[in-house]
Amino acid sequence: MLSARIRIAARLLAVAALAALTAGCFQPMYADRGDGTPGLREKLMGVELPPVDKPNASREARVGVEVRNALAFKLYGTATGMPPTHRLVIRFNSSRSSLIVDPNTGLPSSENYGIDCQYNLIEIVSGKSVMTGTTFSRVSYDMPGSYQRFSRNRAVRDAEDRAANEIADNINTRLAAFFTAGT
């Protein structure tokens, strides 16, 4: 009985020793650095977001503004950013497809909204592209009532906003990984 307790205590001591050895290897992404180099938050605040190039007063222009605003909030928080070190150029295409069509009216009752996005991070000092990537978002939505135009338009707008936020989340995660790991 005593030897079993000694073995368990030895195992726990070994686990604690291994945990202590690896404790210095872990550093949270958003933590302040002790060596004086800028942290992830400061690096993300140095990303400039130019307006998305879409025709004025179009649905895609509104979605472009939504993507840009959501991404700016994720990068800067409530601040306005710092002097830019990088520029993020975003291009995207959107699509809608009908999933279910009401046979009586011929109008869709369920649709899918999608955004396919390409982004390019450019270092301002050198003008060189340091990272490119693509992301996408697909959201579905139902349209209540076949003749309720306002509710149909609102359902589409809500789907556009959800897809734009998902695109912003994906880009923000990729930027954070780039600035943390450098690749």
Image (cartoon, rainbow, N blue to C red):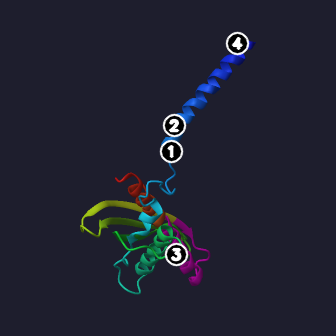
Q: For the residue labelled by badge 1, is the local secondary structure a helix, a strand or a loop? A: loop
Q: For the residue labelled by badge 3, is the local secondary structure a helix, a strand or a loop? A: helix
Quarter-of-image position of residue 16: top right
Q: How many marks?
A: 4
Label 1: few (<14), some (14–19) or many (≥20) C-alpha neighbours in 10 Å: few
**Magenta segment, prevailing SS (helix, strand or loop):** helix
Query: Residue 156 got which mark?
Result: 3
Which label sits in the foreground, 3 or 1? 1
| Pick the front one: 101 or 178 | 178
In contact (CB < 8 Å): disc 3 and disc 1: no
| Pick the front one: 61 or 69 | 69
From which residue to which does the magenta span run? 140-166
Query: Residue 26 got which mark?
Result: 1
**Given the image, on which type of amino acid does mark 2 rest?**
Thr
Give percent across and percent down for residue 144: 61, 74
Relative to 166, say whether 180 is above or below.
Answer: above
Which label sits in the foreground, 3 or 4? 4
Q: For the residue labelled by badge 4, is the local secondary structure a helix, a strand or a loop? A: helix
Query: How far is mark 1 from mark 4, CA to CA?
Result: 35 Å
- The residue labelled by disc 4 is 3
Query: Residue 22 got which mark?
Result: 2
**Given the image, on which type of amino acid does mark 4 rest?**
Ser
Give percent across and percent down for residue 136: 42, 62
**Given the image, on which type of amino acid does mark 1 rest?**
Phe
| Pick the front one: 133 or 87 | 87
